[in-house]
Image (cartoon, coloured by chain):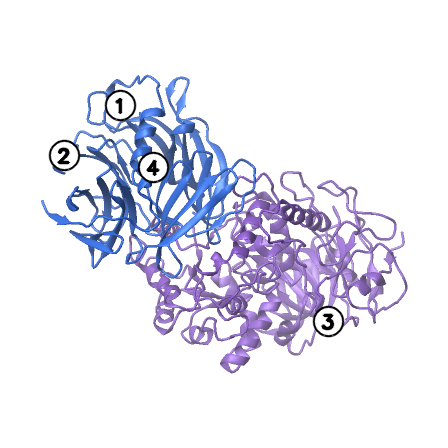
Chain colours: A blue, B purple
Amino acid sequence: MVRALLVVCLFTGCAPHDANAQANAHANADADAHAHADADADAEGKAGGTFRFAAATADGVGIFDAATGRAIVRAPALPVDDLVLDPERGRLLTFELDADDEMGRVVARSFWTAAGWGLGAPLQLAAVDGIARLLPVPSAVVAFEDAYGPRWHVLVDGRPRASLPAPMPRAVWSSGDQVHALTQEPDASWTTRSARATESGFHATTAAPVPGLVHESARAVALAAGVVAIDVVGGALVLRLAERTTPVPVAVAEIADARAISPTRAAILAGGPTRLIVVELGSSGSVSFASLRLDEPTRADPRFLSRALVAVGAARVLVATAVRVHAVDVGPELQLLRDASFRDDGARAPIDGPLR
Amino acid sequence: MDRRVLLPLVLLLAGCAEEGTVVTRDALPDTTEGVDGTTGDATVEDGDSAPPDDTLAGDAPLAETSDETAGETTGETGASDAPPADTDPDAAVSCAPTPAPAITKTGVAGKFLLQGTVVTPDTFFVGEVLVEGDTITCAAASCASMPGAATATVIDTRGIIFPGLIDTHNHILFDIFDETDWAPTKAYGNHNQWPAEPRYSAMVDAKQYLNGEGTSTWDFGCEMEKFGELKGIVAGTTSIAGSANPANRSCYASLARTVDQSPNDLGVDTVQAATLFPTKTSADGVCANFASAKTTAYLIHIAEGVDTSALGEFAKLGTITTTPECLYAAQTTIVHGTALGDPELTTMAAKGMKLTWSPRSNVFLYGGGTDLTKTTNVPLALAKGINVALAPDWSMGGSQNLLDELRFADKVDNTVWGNKLTPKMLVEMVTTRAAKNLALDAKIGSLAAGKKADLMVIGGDASAPYDALLAATPREVRLVMIGGLALYGDVAVKAIAPAAPGCETIDVCCASKFVCVAETGGTTTNKLGQTYAQITGALSKALTDYDALALTAHKFAPLTPLVRCK
């Protein structure tokens, strides 16, 4: 296993109290979202416990068992371009494209019915004349749109709100109603933007430059040590913290997605060839990593936020490619082991989770 | 019924006080209004106004031959409640009467024989065009031998008959705005830069909210679409690729052909327009559509701008797909291509790719409004054998219509390139060459037997018809026929327009024109029964109401004029 040293510090404008936001948000969601009894015996006893995840399928969306990969419920949908769970409201949000991929709609489906896990009738929340990525916040849904220019919208039923002109995020993380994003500006420079998203719109917006990022597919994750930017330089993976960079000797062409899987670990899905890379930041500033080659192409566009990774605790990662989902167990020493028993039941990117 | 109403007040309001003209009012309902889209007091003579329903009540009587109005002038006072006309403060237009077309024989419904100078547009000659149903059955020096000619209504156009113009690049829902609503604050390098301007963003918010996007419960999308179509029709445009969304709404079936939507009256929609650089998934889907012939024309914005970022999009288009360069194909039309140089144009020519040129928009966004060099290298593209179409993009800094765009293109050519583009070449860019970009040249774009009966008639020097089109404005457009239906033109030939549910009379730069907007079968859902007055009234109110929400400091009322007379 290759290890490399990393000097830990924070990007300007990324306050330390936000650093655990993503991981904490997941943990909180996992703990609070559903107290319903789980009738799915298949899910018990596996590494994923009783967790579920949501994913696109060839012709719709579904809820799947995170331990076995088995589909629990499916529903038809238009081509799903983005998908995110909104645990506080018990719903699955999707951005679905029309036939020509030039227009889409934000759709909500309840994922819990009187009979248990299910997918309720689709409810169109919004129409978008372009591309959108979604993020639920406590009081609304944020839609990052590229529709005759990029803007951020707060979607509140029937009520107009001025949008925020800002680039489409490459990575987002939130804490309460605070939304943070890594964006690339029209002049190709990089910025971290923060704003408070409420029913009345965006407030207290800030933007801080992120120097040094190079590749258009760059992503970022919030770890305990700070926000780590993930870049590609010269065909290799590079982690950046402020002005300090740490090369990770894995050949990659682009970053498809990156997610925090614990306060110190991040999973990275890279393309060209497709690889899952897990990095761990040690308390001394060291970086450990491991990678696992996957056979299928990723489903990602470097210009847009993508959702291809789900952390099921710190020891299991679900990895969605363009055609299927893999389960990879992460050992204490970062050993990556693909769960061969994990069923290919039609799930594919985008994915989100976990739920239980 | 007195068929004449004198409306010199309209003319006065239009800045045309020195001369008047007769406005004929002969079909129901007869709302006469100015072309600025203002409504609310559009009643003439007897207090009639457009009915509030989506469908117009009653049958409209077929008017008699209206040649009587030709050449007449008057200065008498007419209705006192005439609407404000074109509000363009720079309007300066001659109000001298122009020769009007005439109906010389009334025939059976659905058959028309148009006489005049016929521009096919490969050539021109004095002759006839026979329309039967929605199809041209003859375009020749004489169509007398055609069986249908004997029973056709004969129109002496006293003008020049062109194929209907084809707009291959428009963002039609934005045509309710113009550069008074937004203009860039500086010259930009590429299309990713100017959308960050706050006023532009606020304008897009307004467009979205009126169109029912986001969580809006408003829905003026049909009105926005039809207003954009009308902007084209009054300038002789019969087909528009307008990139309207949501796609394929039933209301798009009215007025101009929405050639990138399924309600295009062509039986099938194989035109796919893209305003965004495609994702890999989307691009692979287009390649699959090429293979299956589901898509025969792919209109994609590429290389819009003048910097390396814009230029880089062309190479990316070749690598975005799983099968490299599958979008470098004859079905693909590069929209803009402003940044393209010799290597890229060479590739395009080798692959049979096509180009749509929007010079006024280019100069507006990337040349500070004045640097005419900041546009696509069209002479080089043509020299390499690339098929080039011309289109206005949208109303903001782009031209109000294709006639404006033709003139601007001619100006760029004369100023920058030394007059390399002849008027005939420019006309081909909005007719035959435009049809080729859409892969619809078998159906539209020329006057020939078997083609759809989409045509326009203008006045002007018939011995130089291509120059005449470059000089024409909506005032000189005497007749526009789409699918064999006369939808716009001089009131002198209003009698050939659809009798039911009726047409309206509007003032266009001192010329009285009929426009047929409402259709039978209208419902509150499909809105096909809406009149011009209802459409502009709804949009005007919607913009005012939107401004009243005060989401930002930027205001977008009033509705942009249908026509600018300058």
**Nearest to the observer: residue B552 or residue B143:** B552
What amino acid is at disc 1?
Thr
Mark 1 and mark 3 on one chain: no
Residue at the spot 62% in from the left edge and 55% down from the top edge: B176
Please provide percent x and percent y for residue A219.
29, 49
Is A222 positioned to the left or the right of B275 in the image? Answer: left
Between label 1 and label 3, give the one nearer the viewer.
1
| Label 1 with label 4: CB-CB less than 8 Å | no
Residue A321 seen in render: no
Please provide percent x and percent y for residue B402.
59, 65
Task: Give the mark nearest the N terminus, 4 or 2.
Answer: 4
Please provide percent x and percent y for residue A354.
30, 30
Mark 3 = which residue?
Answer: B92
Mark 1 = which residue?
Answer: A50
What's the distance in space between the residues labelled 1 and 3, CA to CA?
A: 76 Å
Mark 4 = which residue?
Answer: A58
Q: Chain of mark 1?
A: A
Name the element at disc 3.
Answer: loop
Q: Residues within 10 Å of mark 1 (few under 14, many from 20)?
A: many
Mark 2 = which residue?
Answer: A331
What amino acid is at disc 4?
Ala
Is A233 positioned to the left or the right of B224 in the image? Answer: left
Q: Residues within 10 Å of mark 4 (few under 14, many from 20)?
A: some
Between label 1 and label 4, give the one nearer the viewer.
1
Residue at the spot 50% in from the left edge and 50% down from the top edge: B269
Q: Residues within 10 Å of mark 2 (few under 14, many from 20)?
A: few
Mark 1 and mark 4 on one chain: yes
Residue B175 seen in render: yes
| Label 1 with label 3: CB-CB less than 8 Å | no
